Image: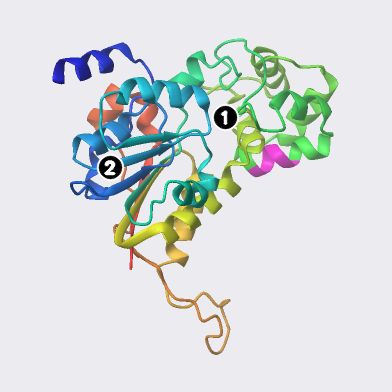
Amino acid sequence: MADRREYRRSSITAHVPVLLKESIEALRITRFGNYIDCTVGGGGHAEAILEAGGQMVGLDADPQAIKVAQARLEGYRGAKLVNENFSHLADVCRELNLKTVEGILFDLGMSSLQLESSGRGFSFMRDEPLDMRFSPNQPITAVEIVNSYSVDDLTDIFRKYGEGSRSRSIAAHIVRNRPIKTSGQLANVVERAVGRRGKIHPATRTFQALRIAVNDELENLKSGLDQAINLLSYGGRVAVISFHSLEDGLVKEIFRKESIQCICPVGTPICICDHEPRLNLVSRKAISPKAEEIAQNPRSRSARLRVAQKI
């Protein structure tokens, strides 16, 4: 079995799991315990859960990711894979009759599969159709947003989700240069709009903003985290790996809110919220990759891991 597993690992070039050791330690895997990988991707974290003795359900909105994970996890007992967005986490558990969950993991990073070979325009490093959907069943694509939204609407998306400046200039330049059909065309338009300074491509934030808007990522994360907390057994843990400040800030705020007694607005004379905390923070600060991991996998540089425990 070891030789077969080693062959499968060497034959799959998908997503290198970030903060693998730290996230598996945070989940405290127990033999035959139930765990959910809400973003199974290439199956790296899921495989580690199974190797540690856990039972694992893996979700992913991307059907290509499910196929890659199936190849990697072939032969492992206790592995179930579901092509579904984690915003439907509770429904999936209900259908699987999964009543107790000891740990839930979210790795919110883009996989190498999506960036390098999906053909959906997630990256500006190659010229691909401007799709950006995780699932082909989603109703709207990036090309529809880019070519039909007004300057004001595009500006709102870039300001809200892009974490950058000059949003209106970029939006106006896009509208003037429509139609824009591919990732390469969009990257060139953004670069002409704002110029290029330093090592970071000026279209990086624009692509991030469009991807978040297409996939409704932040709202899905809110919903998925709330369901995850409800599903955890007492003492169970939820671990979230995020890659930009919008995700990390959202996770931090949800964990903070769910770990305190009162969430009344500041200045309220007496508590009227009747809020009951559901979590303890395992660590007050986010866990970052060590220098050795960053050297081996530069994409891990921006990763942040937050962990909380159900009470």
Q: Which residue is mark 2?
A: 55
Q: Secondary structure at mark 2?
A: strand
Q: Residue furthest left?
A: 2
Q: Residue at x 35, y 25 (%)?
A: 298
Amino acid type, callout 2: Gln
What label does residue 96 carry, if any? Answer: none
Residue 141, image x, y percentages:
70, 27
Is residue 86 found inside the magenta-colored segment of the image?
no
Residue 18 point in image, percent of width and height = 33, 33
Visual colour scheme? rainbow
Query: For residue 67, which quarter of the picture?
Result: top left
Q: Nearer the viewer, residue 252 or 83?
A: 83
Q: Is residue 274 above or below residue 84?
A: below
From what the image shows, is residue 46 above or below residue 92?
A: above
Dominant secondary structure of the residues highlighted in magenta in the image: helix
Q: Is 205 or 264 nearer to us in this picture?
A: 264
Task: From this view, report whether residue 143 is shown above or below residue 254.
Answer: above
| Residue identified by numbered label 1 | 134
Q: Which residues are magenta?
A: 156-160
Q: Which image quadrant is residue 231 in?
A: bottom left
Is residue 157 a member of the stretch shown in magenta? yes
* Label 1: element kind: loop
User: Picture coordinates of residue 20 (x, y %)?
Assistant: 27, 35
